[in-house]
Amino acid sequence: MCLRLAEHKNEGNLTHKFWNKKPWDWTFKQQLFTANSLISKYGEVAVVKAVASPSLTKVFSLKNKRVIPEIRRQLKLIENQSENKQDLEVKEKPSVRKNTYGKKSKLNKLRGLDSGKKESEE
């Protein structure tokens, strides 16, 4: 948010350790406190997605009245995505190897002899 505000005011890039220097020290602390309270209430994924959303590109503070409805909207989207997940069953040790097509190589014939299988079984 501080970077957005600096770009909006045409102040260029923020300096190294800008949070320790005036005028950004108090602005950074306010945004940090607000971000921590929003994260504890809504979760970090919803807050990050809301801040990065196109509807909040012109917002320069997390205390803006448009931030909380957007976080709630992102939270609903995240919950809908978690409900629509499909569970796949993956075997730890599959018993059947993939069948190859075409002529068997000499190496595959040797593997079959080592494991005790006959060529006709494969």
Image: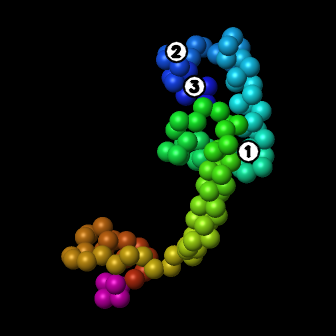
Q: Residue at x 59, y 61 (%)?
A: 77
Is 121 in the magenta? yes
Q: Amino acid at mark 1?
A: Ile
The quadrant of the image that shows the C terminus is bottom left
Residue 11's disc is 2
In the image, residue 88 above or below residue 25:
below
**Marks 2 and 1, the one that precedes in the sequence:** 2
Report the Cα–Cα distance between label 2 and label 1.
29 Å
Can you identify the residue that label 1 sits on? 39
Q: Which residues are magenta?
A: 118-122
Q: Residue at x 61, y 25 (%)?
A: 2
Nearer to us in this view, 62 or 78: 62
Q: Which colour assignment does the render follow?
A: rainbow
Nearer to us in this view, 83 or 60: 60
Q: Secondary structure at mark 3?
A: helix
* Outermost residue, front side: 65
Q: Residue at x 45, y 80 (%)?
A: 96
